[in-house]
Amino acid sequence: MEDLQQQIDELLKRYQDGKTTAEEDAFLEELLFQKMADDDSSTNIEALRSKKMAWDKLEAMHQIASTESSARFFLKWNNRYSATAAAILLVLGFAIFFCLRLSSPTNDAQVAVLTTSTDISPGRNKATLKLADGRTIALDNNQDGIVVDDRGISYADKEDNQLANLADEGKDLFLEVSTPKGGQYQVTLADGSRVWLNAGSTLRYPSRFQKDKRVVYLEGEAYFEVNEQVLSSQANHPYAAAQKKPFIVITKEQEAQVLGTKFNINSFDKQIKTTLASGRLYVSNAAGGAVTLWPNEQASSSANGITKRKINIESELAWRYDKFSFDNKPFAVVMDELARWYDLHIVYANRIPTIELAGDAHRNQNLSLVLRVLDASNVNYRLDKETRKLIIY
């Protein structure tokens, strides 16, 4: 077994360097894309049997049912290697790793710890609604979101089942929707604009907007799709230019003003990031700086001022499409995203790793699959499922 391990290690090194033959490439690809049965016609029966055992044990450990789940994320081995090649190397490495662990004397206990300790489910729809009188309502996890209108508050697909009746209040009330770690929710505001709240976020908004402007308050991260709205005072003046009602999002030390557009605001860190998907966005901050954003631009706002840059919109808004994107992000930022979605507490035993992760992963899969990116990057860690603590060594 050790001789075979050494041979495969050498094969992996030559594959990474682009020096393998077509037959050797096929051997590696079969491990990812097929569960091989014994083939007596082969000249290397031991390799085939070991390959089958490695795949079977990998599948048993992680319930991999298809290549789709196996190759959802990959490491940036080298710019000249494709995503497929990186995924093949990644899965093969895990097959060898588990094969060796399973052959050790204390293997059963180790496998039990590894299997149970990394089984944490992803986040889901989860939020609370706080009314103006202080009452708090736990929102239905089976619903995607709530709608606020003149009649009151109801679930998006259950408009006949009101959560609260606001019609008799006779005044504008401030409402608050909060998502915990491991939660997300959608809110449709009184003007028809929609807001998607990411995990660990709070949106404070009125039951009815003022006549001349629409103002909401955000803590955390949210994606907005804002409807254009013409001021009623201008609606009866056909010869006057239509004046549009501004929509303003206020976060700590920043204000973003739009008329009708799609954008994302992330205010978790000291540096607030505002990303524009469509339309136009005016961003100002407490330090006196201001920028106008166009699609595929991002403003970074802090106490030192405000700047903007071009960005990859798909990477920056990955969470909105149920994905994690690891590209061009500091290690600690990636860990913070995982912490919020899986309700984890991240602890760095020494310093924060300086390595760069790459690729993406789906947010709807268990933590064990996402943590493979750390295994493949040689990051040592320990996960305590009971306390939900992830220790990075």
Image (tube, rainbow, N blue to C red):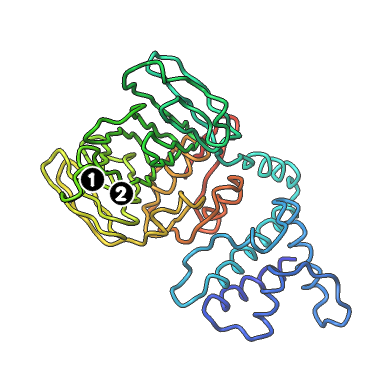
Q: Give the label, 2 or 1, closer to the camera.
A: 1
For label 2, the SS is loop
Is tag 2's residue or tag 1's residue first in the polypeptide sequence?
A: 1
Residue 43: which quarter of the image?
bottom right
Q: Give whichever of 83, 141 is nearer the camera.
A: 141
Camera-side residue of 204 and 89: 204
State the SS at label 1: loop
What percent of the width, then of the height, locates residue 378?
A: 51, 56
Looking at the picture, how far across and down is residue 332, in whole percent? 39, 46
Task: Please tell me how many numbered marks the rendered image carries.
Answer: 2
Which quadrant of the structure image shows residue 133? top left
Q: CA distance from mark 2 to mark 1?
A: 9 Å
| Residue 349 in sight here | no
Q: Is residue 260 above or below residue 213?
A: below
Residue at 47%, 66% (x, y): give it.
76
Q: Nearer the viewer, residue 301 or 169?
A: 169
Given contact means CB atoms under 8 Å apart, are the residues at marks 2 and 1 in contact? yes
Q: Residue at x 74, y 62 (%)?
A: 55
Question: In this rendering, would 213 be left or right of 326?
Answer: left
Residue type, numbered disc 2: Gly
Query: Which mark, residue 260?
Result: 2
Instruction: Tell me the number on the disc at residue 170.
Output: none
Q: Is residue 104 left or right of residue 22?
A: right
Q: Which mark is residue 244?
A: 1
Residue at 64 percent of width and 62 percent of height? 68
Quarter of the image that includes the N terminus? bottom right
Expressed as whole percent of the image width and height from the top left, the position of residue 191 reads 36, 37
Figure check: 79 above or below 163: below
